[in-house]
Image: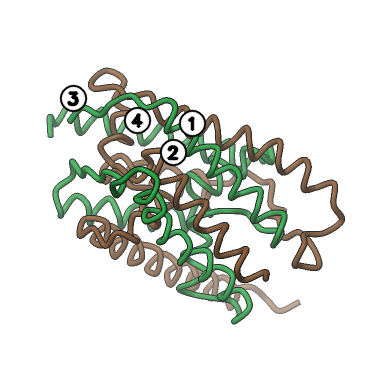
Chain colours: A brown, B green
Amino acid sequence: MRHILTFLTGILFGTGISLSGMANPAKVINFFDITGTWDPSLAFVMGGAVIVTFIGYRLVFRRQAPVFEPSFDLPQNRRLDARLLTGAGIFGVGWGIAGFCPGGALPALGTLNADVVVFVVALIAGMLVTRVMSDRAAARTDTAQPAE
Amino acid sequence: METAFTPIASLTGGILIGLSAVSLMLLRGRIMGATGVLAGVLLPASRYDWTWRFLLLIGMFVGPWVYLLLAGQLPTIQVPASTPLLLLGGFLVGVGVTLGSGCTSGHGVCGMARLSPRSFAATGTFMLTTGLTVYVIRHMIGA
């Protein structure tokens, strides 16, 4: 049952993305092109999604635990650091160039559109390269520090 | 390339995205972030971690086909970027979301809904750099 419901949750997300226009790079780029061919639609996507999630999370967090897991698994880090802001900045440059974000592209990949496949291959390459390099940097830092 | 203003479809789509985020938290206690889902399928920490993310990802692929049943056509995908720019953009998105621990869904929707300061900072930053990038490409380079 938990597998079926998780799968249906993915379908809900993919259908919402399809309906919202987030899977259409021309629409995404036009949202940011305020001085040009502006299309404010995506403000409605973000607004609707954030409000529903804000209210829904508050209802869900009245529970002691999720339905199928022993506990909620939430990011605990609250520090603003250079890595976060650099990453977010680089993500924005890529989003502005391509017009796809990961949440827009993954459902769109289900249509096997060639442009989406190209984007997702490059996306995966960027993710893997960054992961390998930060793992190496972490390993260097570990060996440089004295054992406690 | 002009696109039509679609407030009703976009708001409805946004509400469905929000409901899916709430559903994942209720069922599995997890943040609905496309970056985390993809990273967790490619480089899973454990088989258990892989399974729920894989199911979610396959469900996402089905989404456009549900849309086809509802709307009578697959979602429109118009790509202004050339293939080399699409590759560059995709690579930068991959680097950025990995360093920044999330994207529009994880930070922009779920994180902001949790009032996470990191997500507010990340979302403000990427909205700004996306806007600047679009301005430079459209109005300074003129592509």
In the picture of the structure, the residue carrying the numbered disc 3 is: B139
Q: Earlier in the sequence, mark 4 or mark 3?
A: 4
Q: CA distance from mark 2 to mark 3?
A: 19 Å
Q: Are marks 3 and 1 in contact (CB under 8 Å)?
A: no
In the picture of the structure, the residue carrying the numbered disc 4 is: B131
**Chain for mark 2?**
B
**Mark 2 vs mark 1: in front:** 1
**Mark 3 vs mark 1: in front:** 1
Give the SS element for disc 3: helix
Q: Nearer the viewer, residue A134 or B68?
A: B68
**Chain for mark 1?**
B
Q: Amino acid at mark 3?
A: His
Q: Are marks 2 and 1 on the same chain?
A: yes
Quadrant of the snapshot with the C terminus of chain A: bottom right
In the picture of the structure, the residue carrying the numbered disc 1 is: B11
Q: CA distance from mark 3 to mark 1?
A: 29 Å
Residue visible at 33% across and 67% down? Answer: A125
Q: CA distance from mark 4 to mark 2?
A: 8 Å
